[in-house]
Image (cartoon, grey):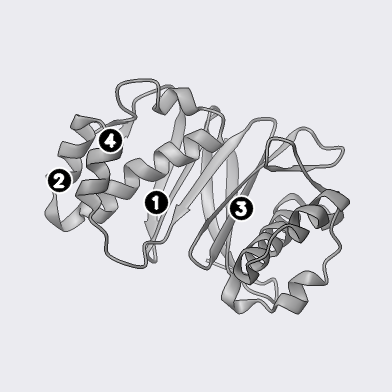
Amino acid sequence: MIELEILLADQRLFSTACLAAQPLSASSAQKLEGMVAPERRQQFLLGRWLLARASGCSPQEIEESAAGFPVITHRPDIHASLSHSGPYVGVVVSTGFRCGLDIEYPARERDWLALAERAFHPDERAWVAAAPDAIVERFHTIWTLREAAFKAGLRDEVVAGPQAFDPVRLQAMQRICWHYQQQQGFHISLVAREPFTSCLRFLDPERNPRR
């Protein structure tokens, strides 16, 4: 079975000068030029840095597609998905099929039940509310599933139907492959049409991965 590796990094550990020194394609440079906020520019550069390492290509080979997501020049078989939450940026690549990644790192308390009331199916809302000590985890289990499926091109599988998540079987309702994990405060979902396993690695500026 194919293993998909999620690369995750904290943009606060990277200097802007270091990331800005990487060569970009013309389309990436143009997209960067349109960004004003320093944090957003840093996030974009870190995403391309991670994607280059995940795919084994040069940042110059990463183009910005008309659909809004990055593609690898001359490698249409490689698919990439990026996600960010707060200062963290995550990347995953797959070969031969599309995947979707969503990472959430909730840094502040919110009214999760009110958000679930607006976004989730009644059965999903009931499952979230049934465990007062696990509301944050249960909310993000469903939220990240939906976001990751959308990025994988499987939006209709989790939006068009009555619900995305089966609280009884604790699995996605539709015919998709889904991994969810909670680790070090992160809530992470990875979705694809094809079966896969996954692992998570953190990268620092010295490019040394750590689990």
Give SS at disc 2: helix
| Kind of residue indicated by mark 3 | Val
| Kind of residue indicated by mark 2 | Ala
* Residue labelled with disc 3: 91
Q: Is residue 151 left or right of residue 160?
A: right
Give SS at disc 3: strand
Q: Residues within 10 Å of mark 3 (few under 14, many from 20)?
A: many
| Towards the viewer: 30 or 107 | 30
Q: Earlier in the sequence, mark 3 or mark 1?
A: 3
> Is residue 168 among the parts visible in the rendering?
no
Image quarter for residue 206? bottom right
What's the mark number on residue 132? none
Q: CA distance from mark 2 to mark 1?
A: 20 Å
Looking at the image, do the residues carrying marks 4 and 1 touch, with CB atoms under 8 Å apart?
A: no
Residue that appears at 55% across and 40% down? 100
Q: CA distance from mark 3 to mark 1?
A: 15 Å
Nearer to us: label 2 or label 1: 2
* Residue labelled with disc 1: 181
* Residue labelled with disc 2: 129
Nearer to us: label 4 or label 2: 4
* Residue labelled with disc 4: 120
| Kind of residue indicated by mark 4 | Phe
Q: Residues within 10 Å of mark 2 (few under 14, many from 20)?
A: some
